[in-house]
Image (spheres, rainbow, N blue to C red):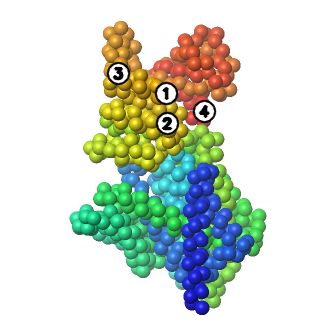
Amino acid sequence: MAGAESAVLIALVAGIIGVGVVAQVLSDRFQIPSIVFLIAAGILLGPEVAGVLNPDEFGTALPAIVGLSVAIIVFEGAFHLRIEELREAPKTVFRLVTVGALIAFVGTSVAVHLFLGVGWLVSMLVGSLLVATGPTVIAPILDIVPVRDRVGIALDTEGIVNDVTAAITAVVIFNIITTDASGAGALIRLFAERLGYGLLVGMLVAGLLYYLLQYVDLSPGNAPRNARLLVLAGALVAYAAANYLASESGVAAVAVAGMLLGNADVPYEEDIAAFKGDVTLVVLSFVFIMLAALLDFDVLLDLGVAGIGIVVVVALVLRPLLVFVSSVGDRFTRGEKLFMSVVGPRGIIPASVATLFAIELRSPEIGMPEAADVLVGTVFLTILLTVVFEAGLARRIAEKLNIIPMRVITVGGGDVGRELATRLEDRGEDVVIVEKDQDRIQRARDAGFTVHAGDGTETEVLRSAGADNAKFVIAATGDDDANLLISQLSQSKFDPEEVITRTNNPENVDAFEELGVTTISSAMATAQAMDNHIERPALANWMRGIGESGDVQEIEVTADVLVGQTVRDIGPELPEGCLIGLVCRDEESFVPEADYTLQRGDRITFIGRKEAVREAMTWAHPEE
């Protein structure tokens, strides 16, 4: 009998992992976050539909398995969070995890109380859990929606921090519900206690792991493997130790340990990150499928219209409110704010904690089955609808709002590569520098650039840097042979709009152009710049200041405000210090006359003061 039960469990686990891999493949194929397919699989295979997957088979071990899986997921998310990157949107990040979290908590609690008529403590329990978005749902979205760094960092940080605070707050409120504790003093004391244990254990584990990785011989032949296993064990130990001291403080411990270790410049960092990413994929598949299989349709249906109303308030009222309040005064565009407003699905922390609490609330000792149904039903309904609609439509929403930046892969982190990256990033584009030299990597990172360490002449390095989504791949190394290989790989393996290469020897220009690669000769460019300074000194001096005081920008005419208008009509609408310098139609560029009428598809060039040109771009394309 025991052997048969083991065989069933082995088959279930193997099947779940297999479904998880298929979900990831489908995610890559259809550009939809994998969590959508995982939840769909859990529902279809679960007791409510096919009955193939029954979570009861795991018995009392399921909460422990889910807890350890959550520890790995949260640790992996925190490990990739770089403190120096937070400068991209420091004010917004801080507000999202403070003011924004408070708005979500209070607003959701009020909505649950008014729509379902339950007590304030149960409403606050639901509200605390639905604060959390979490890396488990945000990371898959950001994998398929290459938003600007400031947007990704804000969403990532919000998810990681709010996962921690939401879990701890929920535990505190749950303890107040099920014990005699009461009052604000008890709530603050219990919250501080759990957060304190998490911080303490997380820092101790991170310090110990850093010491072992940095100063202990992990066996030269197997050091990378041992480092990976050591970090994985450390994450699990941090979670277990903190939870032993105070329930749900383990989430805080792994988040702190992951963030500290990820920012400590430890040896074998890339091996550790790659390994943990694979492990996270497996446990993420298991957790989402299992929790989706726990869905009870009757509980969801009992919520009725009131449940839908709560989800609408959470997703379409509170989420936009907290995002716009949190991003006041920061450099997010309107489209980016709208994207962050409509992409905030709830994830594993609310589901796993709600499931654990529901089991205890239904126990004879506590005897609150109605509260358990409200808790599980509201949390799972919110997760289900926000994941399906927000995560499932994330890429289409981003494309509609036109917030996906032009992604540029620049191979070569020398002076040319860094200067180009500076100019592109100043315009808000998403630039990744690929470089293998450690000194150049450090200089580029110190300057605030996103750097992918590796040899740009290798296909997998280009792919991992994001070449699949790149509009431009630029070969900017000082080696023509390397630039030639990079250009060939980019054209044959990926599908960028254009490949641009630097040639250091003018004699190689013809060879590059035969490949259909846009070629910039360093010698010719330098000679042209010198000639401009001799023949056109005023223009040369002004051009040298592009990106600082002056600017030149080109856009395609698509907005109704431009189509059918003459240059004379548009002139008074342009900001002071900006004018239309060129128009390109049918690949012919010319200086337009005042009576020239713009047509859809024309490309116009704004020239003038930097601020005026940027203002003109915003006026002509309000969604930018």
N-term-proximal mark, 1 vs 2: 2
Q: Is the Cβ of the residue at disc 1 closer than 8 Å to that at disc 3?
A: no
Q: Position of residue 442 (x, y in %)?
A: 30, 45
Residue 505 badge: none
Residue 622 badge: 4
Q: Which residue is mark 3?
A: 506
Three-letter amino acid code at the position of disc 1: Gly
Q: Is the Cβ of the residue at disc 2 closer than 8 Å to that at disc 3?
A: no
Please name the residue shown 51% across and 44% down the image.
468
Please name the residue shown 49% across and 36% down the image.
491
Placement of 507 over or under 86, stated as above or below: above
* Quarter holding residue 398: top right
Q: CA distance from mark 2 to mark 3?
A: 22 Å
Numbered disc 1: secondary structure: loop
Nearer the observer: mark 4 or 1; the answer is: 1
Q: Is the Cβ of the residue at disc 4 closer than 8 Å to that at disc 3?
A: no
Number of marks in picture: 4
Badge 2 density bin: few <14, some 14–19, many ≥20, Cα 10 Å? some
* Quarter holding residue 1: bottom right
Q: CA distance from mark 1 to mark 3?
A: 16 Å
Three-letter amino acid code at the position of disc 4: Pro
Q: Is the Cβ of the residue at disc 1 closer than 8 Å to that at disc 2?
A: yes
Can residue 298 be spotted in the picture?
Answer: yes
Q: Which residue is mark 2?
A: 491
Q: CA distance from mark 4 to mark 3?
A: 42 Å
Numbered disc 3: secondary structure: helix
